[in-house]
């Protein structure tokens, strides 16, 4: 897939997804003077603030040495403590990576106070809920830490190694009965790819996206 | 009703921590100068009352410190209440801990009071909702401890609220509410970057109009005799409790304008349903005027994730530490094999298997390399002697400098282990200098103690290993490890090189199925290196020319043989029966997902071919036969010393001598027969 094809498919996808209540944004690449990255007219697709319930974690695991500070005097009597566990926030970015010549799914998990979720947590959180039939997917889509190619932030990404073979097969399986224009097949590819690889990392697309047929034949 | 508010919460972007860590390292160094930053209030998602439909939405108001928080002139205009604060970065964890937190807040509060008295707050009301954070960054470990404070100015007597909370509909006509929204939008338009947290609402009951104005307009409006409400952008998720900034507003009103009974409009601007609601009206009273000379109390350090007063810790090591990144990437590479080819590959267990490499020469180095690529992470080398000048070209874990040191153990063996750790940071490699005692190399009386200590050390290393590679350069040095591995039923992979031929084999172990007497060690399931021999190992270096003594081989041979050895080892570990597995041949296979698990592979570089061979255990084998194993088991060191010292002892002990004698007798008979037949 060429960058231009990616961008037009992503834009078309964004319009459709937003119609179905999932708010994707197109983010233009911004220059990063510190990293010597100049401005270009490219961008990436982003879905921010996807919340997931936190996993139950043994709290003794993440003790830090500064715990148990004796500071009763600071207790503010007028504070109402929140009793409910706060959800984690995931960010999903679809970035075109020149080296792979295809869109790559990046994600970042944070707890509500902004701390990043580590790889193991993300694996358990996103991949732990897969059923047995989907486990091949888990294995082929293990998110790995990687710097965001545009912003330089610490993200995870789903390695695109295997996508081509798999996508070729699935595209064949869902081949429409009539010849479709190139832009249409790129969009179809994009949707299929994101729905398959996204679900391996906890990203659900609105179901209606797949049933909708914007260009009935 | 006392004024109570939900706990304020922070949300700190990891990139912000990386930024300040880098600033600390390069610019600030030991300086404790606080750095100003901008934060913005983030709207909570409020769960509509009586519905639990979307539990996975955050229900806290949060003060978000974004990656670009230090860029005060960030050009992006934020449609949020902005506030400024200061981050103080401490030099040691102790100073972070020992900071007088009360005094720290007190100083901030004093500064806030000064700003109130000087009139700065009316011009810039967000000064009242500042937040401050103290940080200690462990730059080496990529760990950041941080603790937020949301300074709250407190009255000696806590302010109280009127009991009845009124909805806007109760106090204003819908037309006025409409005007309020329009007025508020107008204020947003004119306020540029950031929404002012506080404003005033001027109500003209006669004209039935409402207007929204900046806080600084209060004195003028009050003089005109109009009714003034104090507006406050309320992010509280709780229906009946306003957010924490209200307390500071009340303090300000009391201190600055001596107001003790005010009506507050909590303006709740929730974008969730894209509709502004401004539903609650509050009346607040407090008894007396705040003491203008001193601040009674300042409160509110943030609670950490455990609900306790204490700092939070952000561990960025998994994302920033290159070592952690390298480890995870190497793991990923192995896991990729599971995708299609080997779904049952157990890479995790390989990393826990302890590999013992007897011999750290050409074979040892190459085996270590293959093991490393397979994800083995526990490697122990055993070797002795010096690294010679010819070694480094073939023994890639050694360098020229190592040849200059006196013995391998001094520097070099450990250097080789360290080099492995430099290739993969999570490698646990170590080296032991040990001379393996050998048959045919008699032990002098005075050295007996040292030799037996070496035997004990070797036995101990084998006992604690999961996989043993036999990679020494002489035949006789393989005898003792072969015996010990068989005794302890440990998988032993043996590699031996000729000039252009090699053999790689896995030794058999005693098979319980062959046991006849429970007191006795049964015979092995497969042959060992010595099973094909009808002579015991002896000193092979005596009376040999240099090319015969050294392993002069084609350079490609060792890497090929070593790789095959490691591949056999991995197959072995994946076989359910482990070292008791039968030998697969190309015709008969049980195998694993990786393919067949053969007994031995003999390779011929001259014809570029390999042959898979099965060797049966030999009942008179000098190293692994049941008769030898049992003698060692009962007589131990005495048996070993005789084997080292007495030239024909092993042949006698294994029954080889008898067998040869019988053979010769048969041969004589046969020759006699032959003669008879030829000469009838």
Image: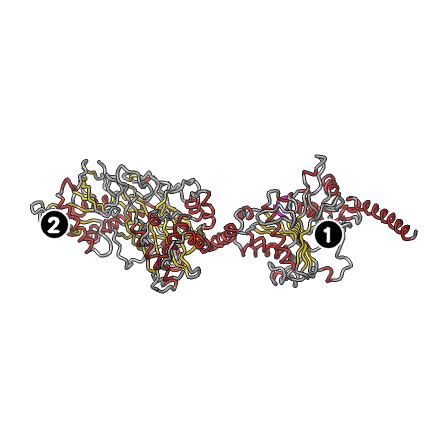
The residue at 79%/48% (across/down) is B646
Q: Please provide percent x and percent y for residue B552.
A: 69, 61
* Front in this rendered view, residue B244 or B589: B589
Q: Which mark is residue B615?
A: none
Residue stretch rendered in magenta on the structure: B461-467
Q: Position of residue B634 (x, y in %)?
A: 73, 39
Whether labels 2 and 1 belong to a single chain: the reply is yes
* Residue B466 drawn in magenta: yes
Residue lying at the far left of the rendered structure: B206
Q: Which of pointers 2 and 1 lies earlier in the amino acid sequence?
A: 2
**Do residues under tags 2 and 1 come within 8 Å of each other at their CB atoms?**
no
* Residue at the image position 18 percent from the left and 36 percent from the top: B164
Residue for badge 2 = B221
Q: Chain of mark 1?
A: B
Residue A72 versus residue A103: which sits nearer the camera?
Answer: A103
A49 and A26: which is toward the camera: A26
Q: Which residue is denoted by mark 1 in the rendering?
A: B476
> Where in the figure is residue B435, as x and y percent of width and height?
69, 52
Q: In the current view of this chain or complex, which residue is farthest to the right?
A: B680
| Element type where label 1 sits in the image | helix
**Residue B85 visible within the image:** yes
User: What secondary structure is marked by label 2?
Assistant: helix
User: Marks 2/1: CA distance?
Assistant: 105 Å
Would residue A167 be counted in the magenta stretch?
Answer: no
The 10 Å Cα crowd at callout 1, few under 14, some 14 to 19, many 20 or more, is many
Q: Nearer the viewer, mark 2 or mark 1?
A: 1
Asked whether the viewer can see residue B319, the reply is: no
Q: Which color mode does the image show?
A: secondary structure
């Amino acid at each position: 897939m060429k960058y231009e094809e990616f961008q037009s498919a992503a834009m078309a996808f964004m319009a459709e997804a937003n119609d179905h209540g999932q708010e994707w944004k197109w983010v233009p690449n911004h220059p990063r003077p510190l990293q010597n990255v100049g401005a270009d007219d490219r961008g990436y697709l982003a879905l921010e603030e996807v919340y997931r319930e936190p996993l139950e974690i043994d709290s003794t695991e993440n003790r830090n040495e500064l715990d148990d500070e004796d500071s009763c005097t600071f207790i503010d009597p007028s504070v109402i403590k929140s009793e409910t566990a706060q959800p984690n926030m995931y960010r999903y970015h679809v970035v075109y990576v020149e080296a792979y010549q295809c869109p790559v799914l990046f994600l970042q998990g944070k707890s509500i106070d902004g701390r990043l979720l580590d790889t193991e947590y993300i694996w358990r959180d996103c991949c732990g809920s897969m059923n047995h039939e989907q486990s091949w997917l888990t294995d082929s889509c293990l998110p790995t830490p990687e710097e965001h190619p545009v912003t330089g932030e610490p993200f995870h990404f789903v390695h695109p190694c295997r996508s081509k073979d798999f996508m070729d097969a699935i595209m064949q399986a869902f081949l429409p009965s009539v010849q479709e224009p190139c832009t249409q097949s790129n969009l179809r590819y994009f949707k299929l790819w994101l729905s398959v690889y996204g679900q391996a990392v906890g990203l659900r697309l609105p179901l209606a996206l797949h049933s909708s047929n914007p260009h009935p034949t | 009703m006392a004024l109570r508010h939900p706990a304020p919460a922070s949300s700190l972007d990891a990139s912000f921590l990386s930024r300040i860590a880098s600033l600390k390292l390069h610019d600030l160094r030991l300086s404790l100068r606080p750095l100003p930053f901008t934060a913005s209030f983030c709207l909570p998602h409020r769960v509509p009352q009586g519905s639990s439909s979307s539990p996975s939405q955050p229900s806290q108001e949060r003060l978000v410190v974004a990656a670009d928080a230090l860029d005060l002139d960030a050009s992006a205009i934020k449609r949020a209440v902005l506030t400024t604060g200061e981050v103080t970065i401490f030099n040691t964890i102790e100073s972070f801990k020992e900071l007088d937190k009360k005094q720290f807040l007190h100083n901030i509060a004093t500064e806030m009071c000064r700003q109130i008295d000087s009139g700065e707050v009316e011009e810039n009301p967000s000064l009242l909702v500042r937040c401050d954070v103290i940080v200690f960054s462990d730059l080496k470990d990529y760990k950041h401890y941080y603790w937020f404070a949301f300074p709250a100015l407190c009255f000696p007597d806590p302010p109280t609220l009127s009991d009845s909370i009124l909805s806007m509909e109760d106090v204003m006509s819908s037309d006025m509410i409409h005007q309020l929204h329009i007025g508020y939008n107008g204020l947003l338009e004119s306020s540029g970057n950031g929404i002012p947290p506080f404003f005033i609402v001027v109500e003209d009951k006669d004209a039935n109009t409402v207007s929204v104005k900046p806080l600084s307009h209060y004195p003028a409006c009050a003089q005109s005799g109009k009714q003034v409400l104090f507006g406050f952008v309320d992010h509280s998720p709780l229906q009946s409790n306003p957010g924490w900034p209200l307390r500071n507003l009340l303090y300000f009103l009391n201190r600055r304008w001596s107001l003790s009974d005010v009506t507050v409009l909590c303006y709740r601007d929730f974008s969730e349903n894209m509709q502004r609601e401004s539903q609650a009206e509050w009346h607040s009273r407090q008894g007396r005027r705040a003491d203008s000379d001193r601040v009674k109390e300042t409160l509110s350090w943030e609670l950490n994730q455990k609900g306790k007063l204490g700092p939070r810790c952000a561990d960025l090591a998994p994302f920033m530490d290159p070592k952690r990144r390298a480890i995870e990437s190497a793991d990923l590479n192995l896991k990729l094999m599971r995708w299609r080819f080997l779904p049952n590959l157990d890479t995790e267990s390989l990393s826990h298997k302890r590999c013992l490499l007897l011999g750290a020469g050409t074979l040892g180095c190459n085996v270590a390399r293959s093991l490393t690529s397979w994800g083995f992470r526990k490697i122990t080398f055993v070797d002795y002697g010096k690294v010679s000048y010819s070694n480094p070209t073939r023994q890639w874990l050694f360098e020229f400098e190592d040849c200059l040191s006196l013995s391998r153990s001094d520097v070099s063996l450990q250097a080789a282990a360290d080099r492995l750790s430099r290739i993969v940071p999570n490698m646990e490699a170590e080296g032991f200098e040990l001379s393996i005692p050998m048959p045919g190399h008699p032990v002098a009386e005075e050295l007996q103690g040292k030799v037996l200590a070496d035997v004990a050390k070797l036995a101990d290393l084998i006992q604690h290993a999961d996989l043993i590679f036999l990679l020494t350069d002489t035949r006789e040095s393989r005898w003792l490890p072969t015996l010990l591995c068989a005794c302890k039923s440990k998988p032993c992979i043996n590699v031996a090189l000729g000039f252009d031929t090699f053999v790689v084999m896995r030794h058999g172990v005693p098979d319980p199925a062959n046991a006849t007497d429970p007191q006795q060690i049964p015979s092995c399931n497969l042959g060992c290196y010595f099973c094909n021999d009808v002579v015991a190992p002896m000193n092979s270096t005596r009376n040999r020319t240099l090319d015969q003594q050294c392993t002069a081989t084609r350079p490609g041979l060792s890497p090929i043989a070593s790789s095959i050895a490691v591949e056999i080892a991995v197959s072995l570990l994946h076989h359910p029966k482990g070292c008791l597995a039968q030998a697969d041949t190309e015709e008969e296979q049980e195998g694993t997902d990786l393919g067949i698990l053969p007994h031995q592979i003999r390779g011929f570089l001259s014809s570029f071919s390999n042959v898979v061979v099965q060797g049966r255990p030999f009942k008179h084998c000098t190293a692994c036969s049941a008769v030898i194993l049992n003698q060692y088991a009962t007589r131990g060191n005495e048996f070993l010393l005789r084997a080292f010292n007495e030239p024909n002892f092993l042949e006698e002990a294994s029954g080889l001598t008898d067998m040869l004698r019988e053979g010769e007798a048969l041969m004589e008979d046969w020759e006699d027969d032959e003669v008879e037949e030829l000469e009838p």
